[in-house]
Image: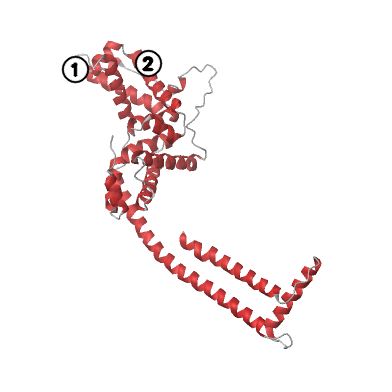
Amino acid sequence: MTEVNPEILERIRKGETGLFREVVDTYKDRAYSLTVKILKHREEAEDALQDAFIRLFRAVSSGNYEARAKFSTYFYTIVYNTAVDYYRKYYQRAFNVTSIEVHESNYSDGDELVRNFEPMIDRNAYDADSMSTERNLEVAEIQRIIRGYINSIPQQYSVILNMFFVNELSHEEISNILKLPLGTVKNRIFRAKEKLKEILFREFNREELIEYIKV
Amino acid sequence: MNDFNKIEEFLDTGMSSSLEEKTSGGFTDKMMREIALIQEFEKQDKKTFKLMNVIAAAAVSIILVSGILLAWLLGSGSADEQQEGFFAYAKDAINTFGYKVMSLFGLSPSGDVFVYVFIAAVAVSVFALVDKFVIRRGYN
């Protein structure tokens, strides 16, 4: 896990503000991934992130951040709260990470994960002449499916997945930041992965999948 | 590594890379310019705040000195002396109004108590105004 050296934070507090560039470079993309998941709007997400960095800078330079707290948890809490504030202003409603709206009468558990997702695999598009080319294309196709799936899942899942896989926060840290029960956090990560496996195994058989991912 | 773990690892990597986004080019430079601006504003704010403090201290001093002077002017003449002018008129008016109001409640305070209460109320009001428009504005 990438963590900013506490010594750098201390030097920023003492006035070496140019070092803040290092903090921005270390976290900007991963934090941006989170604000995009919340806001679903790239410009707003970047503005929110800029605001979050300013809040962080003020906290560090004024000595409000205490090194006792883990820096990444502290920072992502600021990022999450700032993005939620922007969401409220932009969409004129509160951001709800707790419950997922389900309207369909024939809803079954996990449906909300694939409501807007259709894999659409076109196997005829592959050139079967070269085995390695075919394999590469299949791997690319698997990755395209994963990307499509991730882009289609509700924010209640994508925010948690982003925190876990990209921001590298633990289940407990996510639970604290989102104020969600630990079980809910674990369950959503598990269900999201299980649903993805189910989709992939529907399109590829197990051996085929293992063969492709050996590359 | 068994097949199950291979699939798990592949999915974790795949999910992670699918979730990742990139900020626009020049984000860090923009951010650092913003930070430099904030620092400059904070410096200017500190200067303004110092000036505001001096103004506020002067205003409070004027209020206190005026209050003391007014009290001294009103209290310096003996009861027998004929007082004239605006202060004497104002003192009488305040006292008369105060006695009338208090008599409604069956009370009859002695001396120039209403004048002092009035001066104190004016001082508090002026201080509150200074606080609202000068001191607090200096903080923001």
Q: Secondary structure at mark 1?
A: helix
- The relative height of residue A47 versus residue B134 in the rendered view (above or below) is above
The picture quadrant where one finds residue B109 is bottom right
Residue B12 or residue B29, whichever sits in front: B12
Label 1 close to label 2 by CB (< 8 Å): no
Q: Which residue is mark 2?
A: A198
Residue picked out by circle 1? A132
Amino acid on which disc 2 is placed: Glu
Q: Residue at x 58, y 77 (%)?
A: B66
Judge the density around disc 2: few (<14), some (14-19), many (≥20) Cα neighbours within 10 Å: few
Query: Quick one: A76 or A194, which is closer to the camera?
Result: A76
Residue A164 picture location, percent across and down:
36, 30
Indicate the amino acid at tag 1.
Answer: Ser
Q: Residue at x 31, y 40 (%)?
A: A27
Question: Chain letter of disc 2?
Answer: A
Can the viewer see residue A21? no
Provide the secondary structure element on which disc 2 rests. Answer: helix
